[in-house]
Structure formats: C-alpha cells, structure tokens
C-alpha cells in the first residue's frame, strides 16, 4: 500500500523526463536508474512516519518520500562511476555507466537530483510553509556540509572519521525520511530525527558487514569494496563480531526512538522486519564460514 | 549594483556548504567553481528583468538569479569532466577536475545543483505561490526533457538537431532568466520568454564562432572543441559568415522582444552592450585572419 503510493509517484516523475522532442537515451538511463527498484526503504520509512503522524498532506508526503528515493538513486549512479567505485553491476544488473556509458551516467545522476526537487515542487500542497520545510529537509540531506554528497566527499579527504562519514553518507537521507516524513504528515519533525539517524547508521553497518561476508552474486554488486577501495567501515574498525553487536545496539536505539503516536505498533514492526531483512540469520551465519549461502536481495 | 546583489547571495550560499565538521576539499572545490566568476550574464539578466518588472520580491529575485548562476557553474564543472570535454582550463584557471580530481568535480557539480535549490528555498518570500513558480522555472530549465542536462545529453545521441541541442543546452537557462526574473519581479512571465530564448541562442552562436576564431589564451579554455569533439555548431553548419549574420538576426529579435515596461530603455542598452561583449569588433576581425588579437575575457 505504501509501496504502491511511492511507485506511482516515481513512475510519474520519471515519465516527466521523457518527451519525443527530448534526448531518448538520457530518458532511458534515468528509467534504468530507478526501475526496477531496490527495497525502497527510505521512501517507505518516510511515508510510514507521515501516516503515523496523521497523513495531513498526502500528496506532499508521497512526493517527498519519492524524492528521497530519487536522490538515493542519483547517489548510486554517481557512486558507481569509474572514478569512484567503478562498479559494473548494481541490483544484479549492469550499472548505468556500464549500460549507457559514463557521460549519460553523469547526466542521469544530475537529472535525478533535479527531478527529486521537481517531484516535491509539483505538490498540490495544502500548506505553503510545509512545502518550503519539506524542500529544506531535502536539500539539507543532500548538499554539503552534512548531506550525502558531503558523505561521499569524505572518501576524498586525507582523514575521515567513520562516524561523520556514515552520518552524512547514509544517515542524512534516513534522518530526512523520518523528520521530513513527520513534517509532511503534520507531526513534530525534530522528535522523529533520532529514529532516522539510528536506522541510517544501522543500515550502513549492515552494508559494511554484507560487503565482507557476502559475495558478488549474493550482493548484486561487487563485494569486498571497502577494503579494495580503502574506505572506512564498521567491519574493518570493530571486527565482524563487534560490528554485529553495534548493529544490534543501533536497532534497539531505533526501536526506543519511536515517539508515541497512533501508528507506533506498526512502525515498531516495520523496524523489526527491516532489522531481519538487513542482516537475516543466513547472513549472520555466512560470516562464520566462506560466503556460499542462498541468493539474497541487494539492499539498494 | 545588480552585480553586487548577486555576488552577495552567491557568497552566502557557497559559504553555507562549508563547516568545520564537513569535508573541507569539497567546500574548496565548490568555491573554486563559483569564484572568481565569469560575466554572470544569466543572473544579471534575470535580476535586470525583475527590476524592470517592479522588483516585487527583491530577496526572491536575487536568490533566483544567483541560483541560475549556480546551475550554470554546475554544468561547466561537469561538462569539463574527462568523459565530456576533458578541459584542463576554465576561465583561465585549472578546471575543477584538474585542480581537485575527478571525484570532487563530480561531487562539486552535484552539490552546486542542490545549492541552487537551497538558494531559492531559503527565500524570505512575500508570496508563497511565487516561490513555487520560481522553483518550477529552475527545475524545468535544468532537468530533461528540455533543460540544460538534456541539452548536454544530445551530445550522446546518434542524431541531434542543432536547434534542439542549443535551445536546451544554452537557451533553457536564458529563457528561465527572463521568464523567471519577470515572475519574481511581479511581471507577466511568459511575455518575457522570447527575449531569453533569443539571447540564449545568440549566446550559443557567439560561443560557436569564438571557438573557431579565438585561441586558448584568448578564450581562457581550450579552442576548436566543436570540431575536435564533433559537436553541432552554428559555425560548422552555416559557415563563419552565415553564423555572424545569424547572430545579428538573433540580437535584433532580442531587442524587439523586450516587452513594454518602465525599465525598457535600460534593458535595451544592456542587450546592446552584451551583443558587443559577445562578438566585439576584435573578434569579428579575428575571423578574417589567424587568431592573434588582444586578450579577451572568457564568456563563462
């Protein structure tokens, strides 16, 4: 239900980039970047929080949620570029630069950033102030100094602290999902921020663990990248056992960070399901032996 | 006066990307992309139109104008990347990827796109509807199917029509400058569109001519790129004499496209000065002999 609301908006805004008098390959590269999607965890989280807060402005909530996914897709397309991860696959398919070339991958990422704003700007919004607040959440979560672009840029600094790297690279969009989702839904934005921050950090730790214990077939993208690319990683910093313990602590913090609200029980179940999806038992046991478990779905 | 209002906003928003807890090199790369600037023609045009229309919302007008420049800078940074023009210089200095590396150039361009939206979103706007309209002008001028990202993407298509390529690649931001400037100033947006479209096309034709007749020292960036990179170009399509005639026709159309308004005479003078700046006599005569004229200032 949440998923359908999000996909409908994504189809609509991705479609707005295609026109018979516009460049066809760029439109295809953009479509390839967004469909078929991954878990869509950021927009689902944002919309779930909006609903839990009363869904005061449904069109804005849907569009804000979808915009987070578009920003996430943009970051994946640019992170996969030859100058960064040089990843040939993503979600089990060719990455955008592998399928369309580097130039269209740069432009598809650029376009997705702008389409994310288009998505929110075209809201039939009930309260103008809420639109401005939602847009502020969006830009803050992406631009420097603390957005995902800054997170990625920590890879270019001579020294980076793991916590600041992860807080920006992954945490920023998750924090925007919960705080911004609450604002769009009519709730108290700041009260919801810690939930998103905790989930975002847990997500990044899970990603670090999966990078180590799963293989390319299981990940749907190249494995062992953190060591190969010398990136900060919880698994490298704390060891595998330490990273598991840290993940569990973050998920516990996330659960207790859910503010009292009508949809509290449903959100709690969503967080628990996400915890199991991120690090299912099959992954946890894979860490104790060479990776050879059943095919699992990529996170992105 | 217009120039000072724009620089103040640019300094402010570029500064907002820097923080002692954020990545320093990204902040430097962004600063390098914007300062020292080129002619700042797009924001000056937008603000001049706003003022001519009554300057109904000065803060919004300044911010919208500066946002156009940030989008323009983003496009220059990404167009200079190795996978596109692979330009080592820009405005007579090292291009961003030459100075900071390819990864920070990708991220600086991404960040500038988001900072352009931040710039407008943070307006202390008098009318909420006007903010939404200004933001719509901005996203439409950049995203596909008709924005500058689409314009650049025509270089990746097997076939491109010169007019559609130029209308998107250069015309889109100029059209947004006049139509959006009018909206921010309280005028009738669509009545101002033809002025921007004409100036944008003239600007692109002048750029095509300069690419042929000037050398790298005079341009502040590599010369002869249209032929080297096999790009559509008015000089290639019409020959040099034909391109000069086309430029003059476009400037005449621009002059007659200025709607009746209080600031009409001032705008007319601005267009005439721009025409002389784009293709001064020294450039026109350089086309008749090998390039060796006095140092001229780059357009971008």
Image (cartoon, coloured by chain):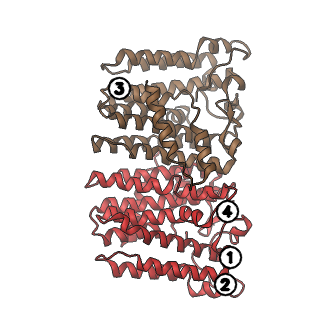
Chain colours: A red, B brown
Give yes or no for contact between labels 3 and 1 (Cβ–Cβ under 8 Å): no
Report the side of A95 relative to A261 (left or right): right
Q: Quadrant of residue B175?
A: top left
Give yes or no for contact between labels 3 and 4 (Cβ–Cβ under 8 Å): no
- In the rendering, at what x and y percent does residue B252 appear? 45, 16
Report which residue position mark 1 lands on. Answer: A212
Query: Residues under labels 4 and 1: Cα distance?
Result: 16 Å
From the image, state whether disc 4 or disc 1 is nearer to you.
Answer: 1
Q: Earlier in the sequence, mark 4 or mark 1?
A: 4
**Picture residue at 70% right of the left edge, 14% below the top:** B293
Q: Under tag 2, what secondary structure?
A: loop
User: Please, is residue A158 above or below residue B176 in the view?
Assistant: below
Q: Under tag 3, what secondary structure?
A: helix
Report which residue position mark 2 lands on. Answer: A287
Q: Earlier in the sequence, mark 2 or mark 1?
A: 1
User: Please, is residue A182 above or below residue A273 in the view?
Assistant: above
Report which residue position mark 3 lands on. Answer: B51
Give yes or no for contact between labels 2 and 1 (Cβ–Cβ under 8 Å): yes
Report the side of A177 relative to B278 (left or right): left
Give yes or no for contact between labels 4 and 1 (Cβ–Cβ under 8 Å): no
């Amino acid at each position: 239900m949440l998923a359908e609301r999000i996909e409908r908006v994504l189809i609509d805004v991705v479609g707005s980039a295609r026109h018979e008098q516009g460049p066809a390959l760029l439109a295809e590269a953009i479509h390839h970047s967004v469909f078929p999607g991954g878990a869509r965890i950021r927009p689902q989280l944002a919309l779930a929080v909006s609903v839990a807060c009363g869904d005061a402005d449904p069109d804005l909530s849907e569009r804000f949620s979808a915009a987070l996914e578009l920003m996430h897709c943009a970051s994946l397309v640019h992170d996969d570029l030859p100058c960064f991860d040089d990843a040939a696959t993503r979600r089990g398919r060719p990455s955008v630069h592998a399928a369309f070339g580097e130039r269209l991958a740069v432009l598809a990422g650029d376009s997705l950033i702008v389409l994310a704003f288009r998505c929110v700007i075209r809201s039939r919004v009930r309260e103008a102030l809420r639109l401005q607040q939602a847009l502020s959440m969006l830009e803050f979560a992406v631009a420097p100094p603390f957005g995902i672009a800054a997170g990625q840029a920590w890879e270019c600094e001579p020294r980076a602290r793991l916590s600041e790297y992860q807080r920006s690279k992954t945490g920023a969009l998750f924090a925007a999902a919960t705080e911004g989702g609450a604002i769009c839904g009519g709730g108290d934005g700041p009260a919801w921020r810690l939930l998103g921050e905790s989930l975002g950090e847990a997500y990044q730790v899970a990603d670090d663990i999966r990078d180590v214990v799963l293989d390319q077939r299981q990940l749907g993208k190249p494995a062992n990248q953190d060591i190969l690319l010398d990136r900060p990683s919880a698994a490298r910093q704390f060891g595998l056992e330490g990273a598991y313990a840290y993940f569990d602590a973050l998920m516990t913090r996330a659960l207790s960070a859910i503010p009292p609200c009508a949809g509290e029980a449903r959100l709690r179940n969503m967080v628990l399901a996400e915890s199991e999806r991120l690090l299912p038992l099959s992954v946890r046991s894979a860490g104790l032996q060479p990776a050879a478990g059943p095919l699992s779905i990529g996170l992105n």
